[in-house]
Amino acid sequence: MSIRITNIFFDLDGTLIDSAPSILAGFAAVLDASGLTAQRPLDSSVIGPPLMDTLAQLTGVADPVALASLATQFKQYYDSEGFRLSVAYPGVDEVLASLFADGIDLHLTTNKRTVPTQMIVTHFGWDEWLRSTYALDMPGQQFGNKAAMLAQQLLDQGVDPAGAIYVGDHDGDRAAASANGVMFVAAKWGYGHFPATMPDPAMDSMQEVLAWVRRHNAKQ
């Protein structure tokens, strides 16, 4: 028998924000500053893999030292101004505020680096609604993957997985949720990195997530 949803964990990129404009601007800035030409189209298809891997594919550079320098340039640009180009998906502010008002604890669980994650949260004014924010490189922690990060977050926050859901746009998010006994909700409006068979439940918008959670809790 299902129980009331009391905690919701959100992915960031592709779930709460469309980070493509900011990330692509960062890659363009690095290429321009280094006098390099993109070796593949600079579009949303490059978003997702680790930074160093993407830079290697974009630039054709193989030297680890040179790639590390390019990565540093990207981070400097992104952390100073690029992150501001991120766009919140429609309804995110209203839905987070509504869920918070409903007494549901909200959390952020992202592979994004800690520094820009905090900047983005503050930029959009979400600080007051988020009970916890975990990033893969957060100080004092060594997470091997998102599943391990979510496990620690659940433990630290004293959350019963049975009363939680994880909303994300990637199959890796689904795997992290599954590994921790948390129900997964697929964000179809994101980057759509799922197998051919869409996980269930799957939602088309943040507003649909809100309505689904309220229906679920009304039955408990």
Image (cartoon, rainbow, N blue to C red):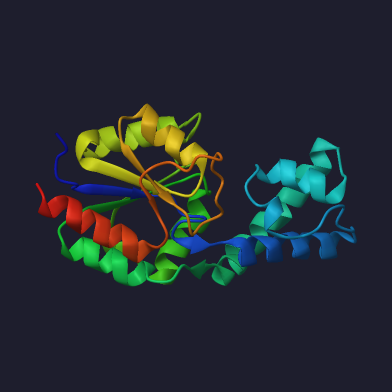
Residue pushed farthest left?
220
Residue 34: x %, y % from top left: 86, 59
Location of residue 62 (image quadrant): top right
Please determine whether, in this image, residue 42 is positioned above or below residue 111.
below
Residue 29: x %, y % from top left: 76, 65
Q: Residue at x 50, y 29 (%)?
A: 144
Q: Left or right: where does residue 23 sit relative to residue 152?
A: right
Q: Left or right: where does residue 218 sit relative to residue 192?
A: left
Location of residue 65 (image quadrant): top right
Q: Left or right: where does residue 130 sit relative to residue 170?
A: left
Q: Is residue 176 visible?
A: yes
The quarter of the picture where the N terminus appears is top left
Q: Left or right: where does residue 218 sit relative to residue 11?
A: left
Residue 213: x %, y % from top left: 23, 54
Please determine whether, in this image, residue 96 is positioned above or below residue 5.
below
141 or 130: nearer the viewer = 130
Residue pushed farthest front?
197
Q: How many marks?
A: 0
Q: Residue at x 37, y 62 (%)?
A: 206
Please determine whether, in this image, residue 182 is positioned above or below residue 179.
below
Residue 131: x %, y % from top left: 26, 53
Location of residue 153 (image quadrant): top left
Q: Residue at x 55, y 51 (%)?
A: 192
Q: Is residue 141 visible?
A: no
